[in-house]
Amino acid sequence: MVITRAYLRLSVIALAALLVWLSTFTVSETDVVIVTLFGRPMRTSADAGLHLKWPFESVLRFDRRLMVYDPGSSEFLTKDKKNLVIGSAVCWRIVDPGRFFQTVGDATGAEMRLHDLVWATLAAAIGRLDLSDLLSVDPDRAHVQAIGDRVRSAATVETERRFGIAVVDLQLKRINFPEQNKYAVFARMRAERDRIAKEYRAKGEELAIKIRAEADRQRSQLLAEAYRDAEKLKGEGDAEAARVYGQAYGRNPQFYKFLRTLESYKKILNEKTSIILSGDSELLKLLTQGRVPDGAR
Amino acid sequence: MVLADLGEPPVVRRTIRDRVRDGRVIAPIAVIAYLCSGVYVVPADQQAVVVRWGKVVDSRVPAGVHWTWPSPIARVYRLRVRETRRLTLGLDGVDPLNRSQFLTADRNVLNIRLVVQFAISDPAAYLFRAQDVNALVANAARGALAQAVAARHVDDLLTTEKVAVQERVQALAEATVVRYECGVTLLGVVLDSIAPPDDVVEAFRHVAAAREDGDRIVREAESYANGVVPVARGAAAQRGEEALAYNTQVVNTAAGDAARFSGIADEYAKAPRETATRLYLETMDEVLPKIDKTIVGADPKAVDLQFVKKP
């Protein structure tokens, strides 16, 4: 009797626990949940916490976190027929779990569909651009981020409608030339470097020649100006001297002539000079005739 | 022992065993033990996020000893929030070489290694908003780098624009990461290494050498100019000084001569004949002793020049 009562009590407790277990479910912060009744979706909940349901309802969970999908790099052709390897990263999340469940099912399926859609959209976008629309110092033409955004918004319209997935972001994280083109690319880079190297040397030479020429010109100019000023100064000196002489000698030109002649004698006559003097010259008259000249008192 | 002293040990023993069997003792003990298991410790360098029934109830539990409902009701996530997280993108072995290559605006290929530093700003968002936060941050930085590099010339990237690119990448990546709302803040982006691929690195070195050469040629010319111009300036100054000296000399000589002449002329005016004779004789005194003289008779019409010839 006692034992049966105890078992009865235990089974009541167990039954209650099972009922509680079946009629509650938790929603994690990372999940979105679909409550289904025999496979038919009844309601969706993204509220984290403890929830109630009918015991015979079951629960499907989907990760609603932001996911990253790397579709790998593929080759694309630009409008000007340049091959580019472009690698992207797609950030996506489930926004409509019902549709996602019906059309895709799981993350792998989502990535497959994203791959196809993103590839096609990106190929179309790249095909409408020249290479210079991607690579350019002109901020209005460098479209890397713009292409990512454009592809994202085009893709997300499609994915939300068809798969219940939102493409949150698309980054073009790799832009490169294909491996088989690298040889040509490197050859072009080398040629360009050579040209730039030559340009640096030539510019250096050019500047050096200019500097030397300028220096030489300055030198000539300095010397010429100095000559001009010096000659002018000398001339002024000569003029001044001539004026002074003229002023002084003008007072008695006759006497100046006499005095200047005597000066010249001093300069002209030297040891090499031979002179024949007449005995009756003014100087020697006294010597030869021995008498006092007329008029001496 | 005490009960044994009271003389009723069998009854007591049986009663305890029954109560244990009834669960009236073990159940409270189990409940207490269960509740005690909810005590948890958060180390000094960490913060904790507490989740109850899947919902975040406390997103910033500080360091210390705390209590919450034990599993499976609640769960505690501990995070090193103050730690700076570091991601290195490119050239690090994990990443094949061509993955770290980027195209510049002038279509050159560069190998770039980028270091991204970030920290957790919102632990709950970090834990629950994104599946792989590192991948998100890495992709944001890589996308930003691809864009920043595509808008610059290779020479600028290798020389003057490095810091500007860093700032641009950080701004772009930060905007993207903020948009992701994944609970992290970008602290910094560093262009750790930026270099041309090995196949062309030699050509880039040649350019650097050529630039050096160009600079050297210019410096040599400048040193020539610095030598020539001052020398010319010195020579010009010298010429000027010489001219000035000549000028002064000529003018002063003239003044002196004029003064002297004036003096003698004054004398002459007083006694013209005597002064003239004196001056004449003084000059003869000076001149005649040095020279070879031949004195002939008063009538010098016929002089045998053989006779006056020097021995």
Image: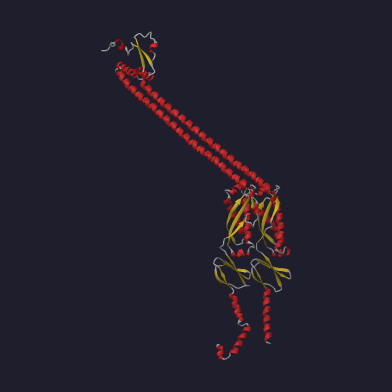
A89 vs B246, left or right, is right
- Residue toward you, A57 or A192: A192
x and y percent of residue A11 in the render?
68, 81
State the residue lying farthest toward the front.
B311
Residue shown at 58% from the left, 40% from the top: A203
A180 vs B88, left or right, is right
Name above or below for residue A126 compared with residue B11. Answer: above
x and y percent of residue B94 in the render?
64, 57
- Residue toward you, B171 or B105: B105
**Is residue A33 among the parts visible in the rendering?**
yes
Name above or below for residue A6 compared with residue B116. Answer: below
State the residue lying farthest toward the left.
A297
The picture quadrant where one finds residue A36 is bottom right
- Residue toward you, B161 or A169: B161
**Is residue B153 among the parts visible in the rendering?**
no
Name above or below for residue B183 compared with residue A266. Answer: below
